[in-house]
Amino acid sequence: MKTFKLRSTSLLLIIITTLFFLGGCGTEVKRMDVDEVKDLSGAWNDTDSRLVSEEMIDDMLKRPWVSDYQAVNGKRPTVIVGEIRNLSHEHINVKTFIADMERAMINSGRIDSIASSVERQEIREERKDQDLNAREDTRNAMGQETGADFMLKGQINTIIDHASKDQVRYYQVDLTLISMSDNRKVWLGQKKIKKFVKRSKLRS
């Protein structure tokens, strides 16, 4: 009888210990404000994308090219975002960065933003479908697109410097606004970010 009680007690302790261990390994989720800054690895993140895009677009719209174009043409300039190259050592979601820039441009109310080549192709397919299936009074004709006056291009570069457990991450974003009519560069923008990362295990 004592042996049975001892085995039962041992089994109970094992079960309690196992449950405690499994409970300690559970995932904890805490909701955050989308504007809250939280750097975990030191890598490029959503905060970098948003702040860099807003600051650079704000600088772009303060320059003389906007008023110069409006004075000559009597309308707001239209801008299309071209290729933004990720030349950094890490994976950066360039599409998110482009979306942040387009939002900043459109919300400024000073310029118009043109759909990308991929977006335009999808819209053109829809117009073709309308030609066959939509009522005439609701059909959108082909050949009525607005052409872009300027193209915004750029690249993201990084430099990583590390020693022992310390690391410095340097990001440089360069943007160029080019006139579609004569290839003039009407604005050059540059934003630099430097982060100091200290952790127990070095990661690139």
Image (cartoon, rainbow, N blue to C red):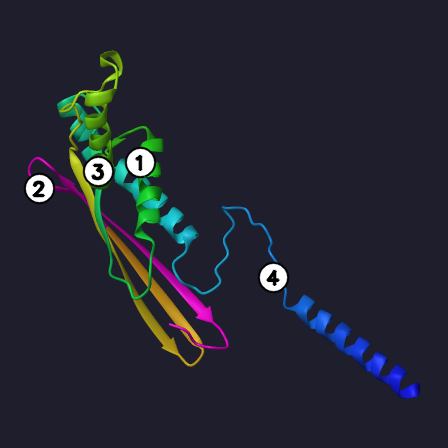
Q: CA distance from mark 3 to mark 1?
A: 10 Å
Q: State which tag comes first along the sequence, 4 or 1.
A: 4
Majority secondary structure of the magenta segment?
A: strand
Residue 162: % across, % down = 37, 76
Q: CA distance from mark 3 to mark 2?
A: 14 Å
Residue sitting at x 50%, y 77%: 200
- Badge 2: few (under 14), some or many (20 or more) residues near its Cα, within 10 Å? few
**In the image, farthest residue toward the left:** 182
Residue sitting at x 17%, y 26%: 145
Q: Secondary structure at mark 2?
A: loop
Residue 107: % across, % down = 36, 32
Residue 186 is inside the magenta segment: yes
**In the image, farthest residue toward the bottom:** 3
Residue 195: % across, % down = 41, 64
Residue receiving disc 1: 105
Q: CA distance from mark 4 to mark 3?
A: 43 Å
Residue 98: % across, % down = 30, 45
Depth check, front residue: 29 or 140: 140
Q: State which tag comes first along the sequence, 3 or 2.
A: 3
Which amino acid is tagged 2?
Asn
Q: State which tag comes first along the sequence, 1 or 2.
A: 1
State the extent of the magenta-drawn residues as a range. 175-204
Which amino acid is tagged 3?
Ile
Residue receiving disc 3: 80
Q: Is residue 78 above or below residue 22?
A: above
Give the foreground label among 3 and 2.
Answer: 3
Q: State which tag comes first along the sequence, 4 or 3.
A: 4
Which amino acid is tagged 1?
Met
